[in-house]
Amino acid sequence: MLLIKNGHIKPIVGAELANGCVLIDDNGKIAAVAETIEAPAGATVIDAGGRLVTPGCVEAHCHIGLDNEAVGWEGHDYNEAVDPITPQLRAIDSIYPQDEALANALQGGVTTACTGPGSANVIGGTFVAIKLAGVRVDDMIVKDPIAMKCAFGENPKRVYGQGGKKSPSTRMATAWLLRETLQKAKNYYEAKKAGKEPTYDMKMEAMIPVIEGKIPLKAHAHRADDILTSIRIAKEFGVGITLDHCTDGATIVDELAKENLPAFVGPSLGGKTKVELSNKSFKTAGILSKAGIKVSIITDAPVIPLQHLPLAAGLAAANGMDMEEAWKAITINPAESTGIGDRVGSLEVGKDGDVVIWTADPLTTIGGHAYVTVVDGKVVYSEQ
């Protein structure tokens, strides 16, 4: 067992404790959160020394483990850019747990990441939610799959359509390829349900969870028209969708507020490296949040190194986002919006024992980082 005592407990869900404790049981689950907890016999005790204690941060959209820190072509395993339709690809088969980016993220207080294929393809494959501590990806999985990646806008056009030699070279073609695949998947699924047993097709098998509503489309969309096209197609086929990046979200906030869809906003650090990023701003997350949209802040790591997720949230708060909403945007919101809110995102009894003791509040203090990081009840990083 592990007892963290004498900390300023910020559970995200529920009231803060100015001086409190968190107890994690032998199964790595949170057993109690209270002002005082007697240390059970044999428990390891960590004195937080009055420091801020929160759940581990959760990243809703990145490519960590697939796009490694290694320089050059080797280590970039997140885009199979030979076919615009690759739903059969699985993130778990490219994740390299030994990449230093994962250890850096733990030092930055990020304990869970939703990671997967990039945005080269119209349909890129499945995302997975993993803990960032471990040596074998099979033992790090929180949920697999969590979503099917799809992409709109510049990226698939640039990868396939430059020179007009291959589709998609237009936004129309991107929409066509996605629609065609969804319709084929629907037909395949309905044939199987009817007992007709169509010829096995791995692409169509991978799409069945989307058609069944078990996982959403994960829509890379920056520009306003791309965001609305992604929603239009999801509605046509009755499938779920999350709005990833949502760079132009503030320009269509009233429309998005009608849709009741989660928005994963970012990456907001860095330059405007392509046309569809012209409206990139740290103000976007706060504008969407104040309109009632459930917002998660994302790094798109390695675009922004994952350890800087709290910094991105702090910059959103400095640009108009409510501070409490900024904390939710890197904890409970991404957890709930990716279907893992029963496991992570808050300090609640029964959830995974993922806890961060901070050197300073990372949303208000430049350089604030983890003093101690705990994943599933085990200390995985410590400055002690």
Image: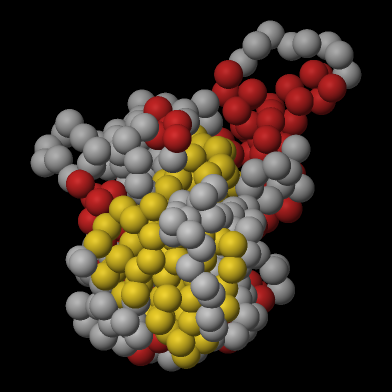
Residue 72's spot in the image, x, y percent? 12, 37
Res 383 → quadrant: bottom left
Residue 377's spot in the image, x, y percent? 44, 54
Q: Residue at x 23, y 56 (%)?
A: 104
Q: Nearer the viewer, residue 255 or 60?
A: 60
Q: Nearer the viewer, residue 169 or 75?
A: 75
Residue 237's spot in the image, x, y percent? 74, 44
As drawn, 44 above or below 198: below
Side (left or right) of 239 relative to 314: right
Q: Residue at x 56, y 42 (%)?
A: 143
Q: Nearer the viewer, residue 301 or 15?
A: 15
As drawn, 119 above or below 342: above
Residue 60's spot in the image, x, y percent? 47, 57
Q: Which corner quadrant holds the C terminus?
A: bottom left
Side (left or right) of 145 relative to 115: right
Q: Residue at x 39, y 52 (%)?
A: 378
Res 350 → quadrant: bottom right
As drawn, 181 above or below 105: above
